[in-house]
């Protein structure tokens, strides 16, 4: 065990130290200069896109996708496709107008668009809910990783990652510094791509063996399942395509773009970067069918185990260390981004508003709450699939913020009453499914299918509620709607009388 | 109000009538506080008619009808003529049937009470109450309501002038580029014309860009990037003059460059820092300008290692004491508070001989603030 554990421990320690060190000192290296004209140099779209990629690629992408592919086959390819294509919807419909709105967070957008504190508070609650739902699988993935590579008990991983994230976030060292996040993307890509290349070479050297158990259902989409399978697929597509725009840690990154055009260019680069990254996990899934068929029960650790199963001795350890480092980087970057987003909302709209705490203390308290809750849940529910849990976060985001953003940007008759109605309906609908799934709702049949992947019905329902609620209260259309929408859709260069 | 268990606490019938009247008035007041427009008249007239209990009510400005509420709107075309008379005379007038020709049977409008709306001793419009017959009570009530509406319109005027004052202050700040600065810059540029013509040309262009930005007419807000660009130009010009005596360090997080900030809110701080940093003496002055990302907020710091200042004096400057040298500081402070609320004013850390550090905290998003 000790020899096996060594690469894992080394990798985890290195990534932790590197991340904290870059966060703490990197700021000084990258910023302080007496050179003039640095000030006018804003973050360029390529760097910003890499940072978004670094923050976005989470445990679910790094570990979950390969595991799902191993277990459930080609249908699961919709996860990486959807997680990428979500940015296409973002690019076409949301990116530039959202940037031009001047909003930093989603509650900011709601307030600016509808001029209502009520909608703002509801959105803050939703940000916290989605953030926690997304954080919990990250911590859980950390538990899996440590158990698989070091042999630590399952509860230790969430606590360790939670503690590191908390230390980084509260000390101010792990703020979403563009440079650090961009580095994380390349680290994750290298950590996944390099071992994959080696493993493919090994596979070719072995004479390209095929899976021992040949199973047509695995490689064909929708092979079994019929109508239900089709429903599940469409629902997954709806959740992932429409959910990306509602993720709190993604949206705040768009603020860094200097204007709407740059926001679009950034999104385009994100699409390319994610497309590149998501080519790799399926390779692990397919190789897993050949070399690691016995992992079915704990498929989330496939990416971590595969190098050791395929390559013996020292090189195997090096590859394992690399993969573990990538996975750990994935937990740290995504969860610190999310923790900052959740803590920001908590400190601004909950703690800061009532308490007598000043800014920094309120933020620290909020960060503790933001990290502790999902950490405890991750310890309590160790068996939910990482990618599935993230899928649920997407479903909630798609059922709540997607209607708000799309109608807010493209429909002038939206009112605060309609928005509240839509958000509540969407949240209750998708939230029921979340609770049911986390409570290990089993069974088969249509009921189970509808609750496993709620997006296909909860998203249209939320849209309908929002539209009908707005149409029923035409007198509550905010007075500034026309002006606001012009600002969202007119290029910055137009000399409008703003 | 119809809940029986609450009734005893609301007092007598007369009390309740008072409450009702006050409540109705409070409903009309928000619209009127926006000034006298078609929109505000439209939104308030219903409540005003409820106050008077008249079958019809009209609000006009000096030119014509703004809004009509109630029955008999075939009389609406007479409104302008009635208004003209009241505007001319400047007091409440009563009109009877002969002034309101009508061919409809059972039309309840036979008499009109027309009261002028007066803002700062100028008639801006009229309030016209129509009724079946004339009573002294209606005339008195119409007069009083018109006076109350005038009061609200005066408050609206006050709001508007407060906004105008703020704008005037920004304009004053723009015009405040000190003559000394212009003189010194041009002098410094002139000294380069022979020795280093290229540099002189560059500096002149910087000077042109700097003044163009400072005299810009539109927009109350700008991005931090624009503001810092102007600061850089200013510092380039000052460096041309002071040479090595002025050292500048910038530490700007690129993430906060798109933040919207009030126009000319950093430049005056830097100007103060240069003045303090280099004042009195031939030594070096070091100025540090930093902008960092704190999640929901962006923190901007301007620091110098100069002679510092008496904290009491700074306090008075921030309170708006114009006799002091740093008018810019008080103005920036007031505009920051106005835009983001009182907790976002300037924070000045200073003591005699210990340099000065001014900190600005700007939220990344605030309602109503955009470039």
Image: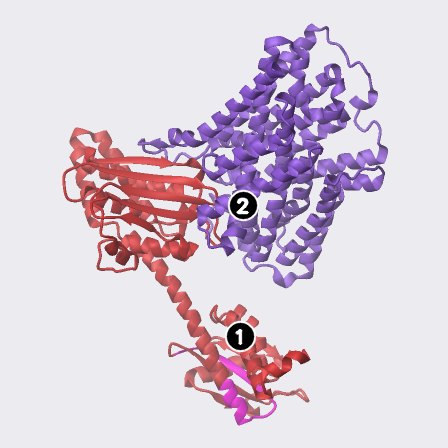
Q: To which chain does the residue with label 2 belong? A: A
- Residue A277 rendering spot, x and y as whole percentages: 61, 24
- Residue A244 rendering spot, x and y as whole percentages: 63, 38
Res B371 seen here: no
Look at the image and say whether residue B137 sits in the magenta stretch. yes
Q: Which residues are magenta?
A: B122-143
Q: Secondary structure at mark 2?
A: loop
Q: What colour scheme governs how the chains and residues are painted in the rendered image of this protein? A: by chain
Q: Name the residue beneath numbered marker 1.
A: B26
- In the displayed structure, B218 sits above or below B20; it is above
The image quarter in which residue A382 lies? top right
- In the displayed structure, A471 sits above or below B285; it is below
Q: Name the residue beneath numbered marker 2.
A: A105
Q: To which chain does the residue with label 1 belong? A: B
Q: Residue at x 45, y 78 (%)?
A: B150
What hue does chain A carry in this figure? purple
Residue farthest to the left, as pictured: B281
Chain identifier of the red chain: B
Look at the image and say whether residue B291 sits in the magenta stretch. no
Q: How far apart are the two marked residues, 1 and 2, measured between alpha carbons? A: 35 Å
Q: Nearer the viewer, residue B91 or B146?
A: B146
- Residue A109 rendering spot, x and y as whole percentages: 55, 49
- Residue A39 rendering spot, x and y as whole percentages: 37, 36
Q: Quadrant of the N terminus of chain A?
A: top right
């Amino acid at each position: 065990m000790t020899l096996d554990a060594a690469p894992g421990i080394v990798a985890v320690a290195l990534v932790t130290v590197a991340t904290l060190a870059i966060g703490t000192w990197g700021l000084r290296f990258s910023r302080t200069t007496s050179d003039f004209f640095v000030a006018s140099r804003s973050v360029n779209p390529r760097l910003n896109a890499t940072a978004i990629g670094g923050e976005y690629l989470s445990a679910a992408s790094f570990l979950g996708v390969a595991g799902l592919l191993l277990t459930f086959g080609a249908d699961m390819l919709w996860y990486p496709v959807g997680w990428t294509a979500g940015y296409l919807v973002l690019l076409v419909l949301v990116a530039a107008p959202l940037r031009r709105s001047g909003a930093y967070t989603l509650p900011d957008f709601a307030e600016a668009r509808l001029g209502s504190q009520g909608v703002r508070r509801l959105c803050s609650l939703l940000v916290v809910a989605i953030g926690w739902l997304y954080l919990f699988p990250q911590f859980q993935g950390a538990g899996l990783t440590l158990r698989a590579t070091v042999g630590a008990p399952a509860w230790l991983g969430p606590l360790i990652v939670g503690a590191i994230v908390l230390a980084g976030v509260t000390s101010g060292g792990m703020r979403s510094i563009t440079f650090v996040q961009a580095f994380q993307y390349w680290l994750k890509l290298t950590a996944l791509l390099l071992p994959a290349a080696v493993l493919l070479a090994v596979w070719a050297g072995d004479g390209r063996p095929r899976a021992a158990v040949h199973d047509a259902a695995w490689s064909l989409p929708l092979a079994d399942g019929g109508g239900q399978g089709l429903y599940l697929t469409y629902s997954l597509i709806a959740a992932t395509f429409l959910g990306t725009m509602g993720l709190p840690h993604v949206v705040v990154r768009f603020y860094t773009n200097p204007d709407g055009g740059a926001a679009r260019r950034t999104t385009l680069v994100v699409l390319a970067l994610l497309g590149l990254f998501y080519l790799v996990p399926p390779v692990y899934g397919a190789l897993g069918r050949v070399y690691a068929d016995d992992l079915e029960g704990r498929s989330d650790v496939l990416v971590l185990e595969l190098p050791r199963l395929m390559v013996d001795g020292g090189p195997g350890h090096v590859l394992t260390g690399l993969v573990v480092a990538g996975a750990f980087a994935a937990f740290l970057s995504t969860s610190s981004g999310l923790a900052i987003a959740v803590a920001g909302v908590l400190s601004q709209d909950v703690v800061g508003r009532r308490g007598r705490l000043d800014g920094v203390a309120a933020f620290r308290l909020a960060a503790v709450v933001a990290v502790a809750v999902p950490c405890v849940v991750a310890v309590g529910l160790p068996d939910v699939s990482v990618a599935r849990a993230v899928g649920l976060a997407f479903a909630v985001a798609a059922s709540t913020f997607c209607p708000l953003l799309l109608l807010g940007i493209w429909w002038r008759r939206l009112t605060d009453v309609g928005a509240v109605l839509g958000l509540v309906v969407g949240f209750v609908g998708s939230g029921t499914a979340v609770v049911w799934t986390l409570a290990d709702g089993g069974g088969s049949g249509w009921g189970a299918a509808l609750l496993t992947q709620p997006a296909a019905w909860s998203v249209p329902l939320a849209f309908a509620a929002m539209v009908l609620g707005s149409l029923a209260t035409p007198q509550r259309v905010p007075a500034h709607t026309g002006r606001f929408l012009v600002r969202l859709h007119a290029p910055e260069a137009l000399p409008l009388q703003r | 109000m119809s809940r029986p268990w609450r009734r005893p606490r609301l007092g007598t019938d007369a009390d309740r009538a008072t409450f009702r009247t006050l409540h109705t008035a409070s409903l009309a007041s928000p619209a009127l506080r926006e000034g006298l427009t078609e929109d505000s008249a439209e939104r308030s007239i219903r409540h005003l008619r409820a106050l008077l209990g008249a079958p019809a009510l009209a609000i006009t400005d000096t030119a014509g009808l703004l809004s009509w509420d109630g029955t008999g709107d075939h009389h609406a075309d007479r409104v302008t003529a009635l208004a003209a008379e009241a505007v001319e005379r400047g007091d409440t007038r009563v009109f009877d049937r002969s002034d309101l020709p009508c061919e409809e049977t059972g039309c309840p409008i036979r008499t009109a009470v027309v009261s002028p709306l007066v803002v700062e001793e100028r008639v801006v419009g009229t309030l016209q109450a129509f009724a079946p017959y004339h009573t002294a009570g209606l005339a008195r009530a119409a007069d009083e309501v018109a006076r109350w509406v005038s009061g609200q319109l005066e408050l609206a005027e006050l709001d508007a002038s407060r906004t105008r004052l703020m704008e005037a202050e920004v304009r004053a700040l723009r015009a405040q580029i000190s003559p000394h600065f212009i003189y010194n810059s041009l002098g410094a540029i002139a000294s380069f014309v022979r020795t280093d013509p290229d540099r002189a040309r560059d500096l002149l262009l910087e000077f042109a860009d700097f003044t163009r930005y400072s005299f810009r007419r539109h927009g109350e807000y700008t991005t931090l990037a624009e503001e810092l660009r102007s600061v850089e130009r200013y510092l380039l010009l000052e460096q041309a003059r002071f040479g090595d005596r002025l050292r500048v360090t910038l530490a700007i997080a690129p993430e906060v460059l798109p933040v919207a900030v009030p126009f000319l809110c950093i430049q005056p701080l830097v100007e103060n820092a240069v003045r303090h940093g280099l004042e009195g003496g031939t030594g070096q002055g070091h100025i540090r300008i930093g902008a960092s990302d704190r999640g929901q907020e962006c923190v901007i710091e301007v620091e110098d290692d100069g002679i510092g200042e008496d904290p009491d004096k700074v306090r008075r400057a921030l309170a708006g004491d114009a006799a002091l040298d740093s008018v810019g500081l008080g103005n920036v402070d007031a505009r920051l508070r106005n835009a983001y609320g009182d907790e976002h004013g300037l924070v000045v850390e200073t003591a005699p001989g210990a340099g000065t550090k001014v900190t600005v905290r700007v939220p990344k998003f605030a309602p109503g603030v955009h470039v």
